[in-house]
Amino acid sequence: MPKPTFFNLPKERRHLIFRHALEEFAQFPYEQASLSAIVSKANIAKGSMYQYFSGKKDLYMYLITEVYGQKREFLQPLWEQKEKLDFFKLASLYYQRSWHFARQYPLHHRVTVNFWDSKDASLREEILRKKEIRISEFSEMLELGLQSGAVSPDINKDAVWFVYHAVAKALVDNFADSDVNAESHEAYIDSVLAVLELGLRPRKEQ
Amino acid sequence: MPKPTFFNLPKERRHLIFRHALEEFAQFPYEQASLSAIVSKANIAKGSMYQYFSGKKDLYMYLITEVYGQKREFLQPLWEQKEKLDFFKLASLYYQRSWHFARQYPLHHRVTVNFWDSKDASLREEILRKKEIRISEFSEMLELGLQSGAVSPDINKDAVWFVYHAVAKALVDNFADSDVNAESHEAYIDSVLAVLELGLRPRKEQ
DNA sequence: CTCCAATGTGACTGGGTGGTCACAATTCCA
DNA sequence: TGGAATTGTGACCACCCAGTCACATTGGAG
């Protein structure tokens, strides 16, 4: 939690700090990121930083909540359509939009990736908390798919979550910084999701 | 490449170094791992290390090739059966065995995970090289599946590779250190692979 | 204008890092 | 046994880090 002093700051100064923290933690995982580098690039005295935050981890956690908050806002519109669309269409939109977020805010994206990959023990619980949220959102989506009959009732739900989570992570991680053009990557995302939808075994129907 | 001196060493001393390097690089990614910690735990003078290796990265690359060599040996027997088994059976065996490797040699496994996740520019090319190898092995497997008719010809091959790679990575990474019992995790692996085989959409046949 | 609280500052501390080097110990062969 | 080549050593260097603290600056209320 930032100290009260931080919130008294003019918003441009808060922005300055946010921007440079974002850059540093996008480039390096928590342990390798350097507070000294942040203050030096932002032209802020080291001591000032410690008037705003109790330490490196405090700054980091502030950044993380801010970044995830913005990501949530970005994805929000999608959830409002969840009743109207079938599972596969919703999944497609969801992962398309996640990729667009990564594309539009590459620094935010890299921060979340570094955070997610972090092995630091004291960060694990926060990571697990966020994972729980994702699981429950996905479960809700999947449940709707099952009820509507779009998704086969024979499958193992945990396994489905696992597969989608793994694939989505790879889909976003691996292409955020590549210079593929948007339409072709959107098509690629859909062809990956088609594999999950139809399976590898040939289908006799249709 | 280690210096000649290293290979003149009695093998128990080489083992000593290997063991402690393994532990350190299993626990920390390259940048965070400490050469000082390795020499101190192994009771070896810092200077000696620099008689064996030209630096930290040299030691690391030696460790990486060693670890991947051992993993390759471990998975070798599987490839000899590739002509006899169908795609899905082979995939199951392959990922089962990968998991067993991670289970049996957790330190080796963690080293490979840290290596794979590394963002260091000078390590990237080595990572890409290893990725190419995996891709070509998998493509071979998939081609056999297509020829035998076990795999639908309508799918996008790149997308299939992508999906399997992502899922396999998650499957091994996330459960290597958990204390699940072996049989139940083997079953879980198969249920995840079943999702990929059959797809989420209900099948009318059967 | 005065005074005091809030904010800004950067030299400094203690600790860690990879890498070096002058020298000591050992090994091996003539 | 002598002497050269190989191997072992740890104090030391320059650098970087998170965090501290005594002090300077600012700004607003009375």
Image (cartoon, coloured by chain):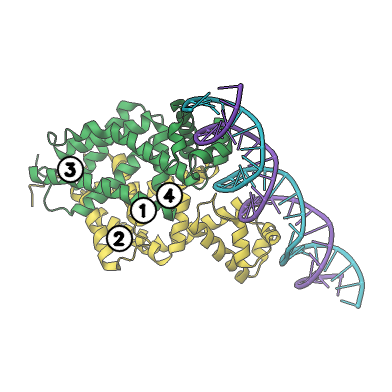
Chain colours: A green, B yellow, C purple, D cyan
Residue B74 location in percent, x, y? 42, 63
How many other residues sit within 10 Å of disc 3, few (<14), some (14-19) or many (≥20)? Answer: many
Please tell me the numbered disc located at residue A118: 4
The amino acid type found where label 4 is placed reads Ser
* Mark whose residue sits in front, 1 or 3: 1
Q: Are marks 1 and 3 on the same chain?
A: yes
Observer-nearest residue: B102 or B10?
B102
Residue A200 seen by the camera:
no
The amino acid type found where label 1 is placed reads Glu
* Mark whose residue sits in front, 4 or 2: 4
Which chain is home to disc 4? A
Q: The residue tagged with tag 1: helix, strand or loop?
A: helix
Q: Residue at x 34, y 59 (%)?
A: B175
The amino acid type found where label 2 is placed reads Leu
Residue B158 seen by the camera:
yes
State the separation of the CA atoms marked 1 and 3: 25 Å
Q: The residue tagged with tag 3: helix, strand or loop?
A: helix
Among the 4 quarters of the image, the one containing residue B19: bottom right
Q: Name the residue under label 3.
A: A141
Residue A135 location in percent, x, y? 25, 48
Q: Name the residue under label 1.
A: A125
